[in-house]
Image (cartoon, grey):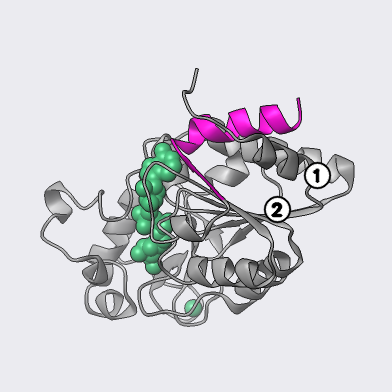
Amino acid sequence: MLDVDIPTSLIETLNEAQAVTILTGAGVSAESGIPTFRDAMTGLWAKYEPEQLASPKAFEKEPELVTRWYDERRRLALEAEPNPGHLALARLERIFEKLGREFTLVTQNVDRLHQRAGSRRVIEVHGAVTVWHCSKCLEGNEERGGPFEKYPPVCGKCGGVRRPAVVWFGEPLPPGALDEALNAAARSDLFLSVGTSAMVYPAAGLIELIRRNHACSLEINTQETSSTHLMDWSIQGPSGEVLPKLVDLAFA
Ligand code: OAD
Ligand code: ZN
C-alpha cells in the first residue's frame, strides 16, 4: 500500500467539486515505461539535441532522420499499456459524468494512453504521435502503426512530406485545443496538475488562471516543481499509485 497521506480536506474538495480540470504530463506515462523525450535520447540518438529531432527546421533539413525518430517514439507508445493512473482518470471522468458535473482532461502527452485507458474526451495540446498528415496541405490524417514503405513518406495529393501531428519546438499550440483548455479551467473549482514539470505553456498559464479565479489546486508529482509552492495541496508520489487511491477515497 502506498505510503502517502491524502488530506481529508482534499478528499472532500474532490468529492464536492462541480467542475474539475486535470492537466497531465510525461510523468503520468512514466509507469507505463514511456521515457520522456529527453530520456529516450540514448544510443543512436544520444548525439542529437531535442531541437534537431523535433523542430520544423530539423524536419526541413533531415526529414528522414526526424521520421525515423518518430517511428521509434510511436513504437514505444503503441507497445506501452495504460497504467493505474490513466485508468483512475478514466474512472473519474465516468463518475463526474454520472453526477452531471464537468470534467476536462488536458494532456501534454502524445502517446494516446489516456484514450486507450478509456478516457472519452481528451484535449491534446501537443498532438498525437500516432497520427500523421501532410506537412504541406495538412490533409490525409492517418493512424499510423508500423514503419513506412518509403523514407520520408510523401503525400499522394500534393507531394509534400508527411509528418507526425505533434507540436514541435517553435510551433504554436493548436488554437482550438488551447482555447478549450483555458475555458474549461476558467469554469473549474478544482485543478489537478499531474506528472508535469509545469514549466512550459500552457501548464504555467493554466495555473495562473486557476489562481486568479481562487479555484483549488493539487499537484501530484514524484518531485517538487517550480509550481509546487503555488498549489493548495501537493502530493509527492507516483501518479499510478496516488490517483487510484485519491479516487477511491473521494468516491468510495
Ligand atoms: P517533463 O519531462 O518536463 O516532466 C515530467 C514530470 O513528471 C517531472 O516533473 C517528473 O518529476 C514527473 N514524474 C516522473 N515520474 C512520475 C510519476 N511516476 N508520477 C508522477 N510524476 C512523475 O514533461 P512535461 O511536463 O509533460 O515539449 O513536459 C511538457 C513538454 O515539455 C513536453 O511535451 C515537451 C517538453 O519540452 C515538446 O516536445 C514541445
Ligand atoms: Zn499534401
Q: Is residue 34 left or right of residue 182?
A: left
> What's under tag 2, amino acid-wise?
Arg
Look at the picture and state if 15 lies above or below 232: above
Which of discs 1 and 2 lies nearer the camera? The answer is 1
Give the residue displayed 53% in from the left and 77% down from the top: 138
Q: Is 250 a magenta residue? A: yes
Name the element at disc 2: loop
Residue under label 1: 16
Q: What percent of the width, then of the height, locates residue 247? A: 67, 33
Alpha-carbon neighbours of circle 2 within 10 Å: few (<14), some, or many (≥20)?
Answer: some
Q: Is residue 108 visible?
A: yes
Per the rendered image, the range of residues in magenta is: 233-252
Q: What percent of the width, then of the height, locates residue 14? A: 72, 43
Q: What percent of the width, then of the height, locates residue 80? A: 43, 36
> What's under tag 1, amino acid-wise?
Glu
Name the foreground residue: 127 vs 86.
Answer: 86
Q: Earlier in the sequence, mark 1 or mark 2?
A: 1
Name the foreground residue: 44 vs 199.
Answer: 199
Name the element at disc 1: helix
Name the foreground residue: 152 vs 74.
Answer: 74
Give the residue displayed 13% in from the left and 55% down from the top: 46
Residue under label 2: 121
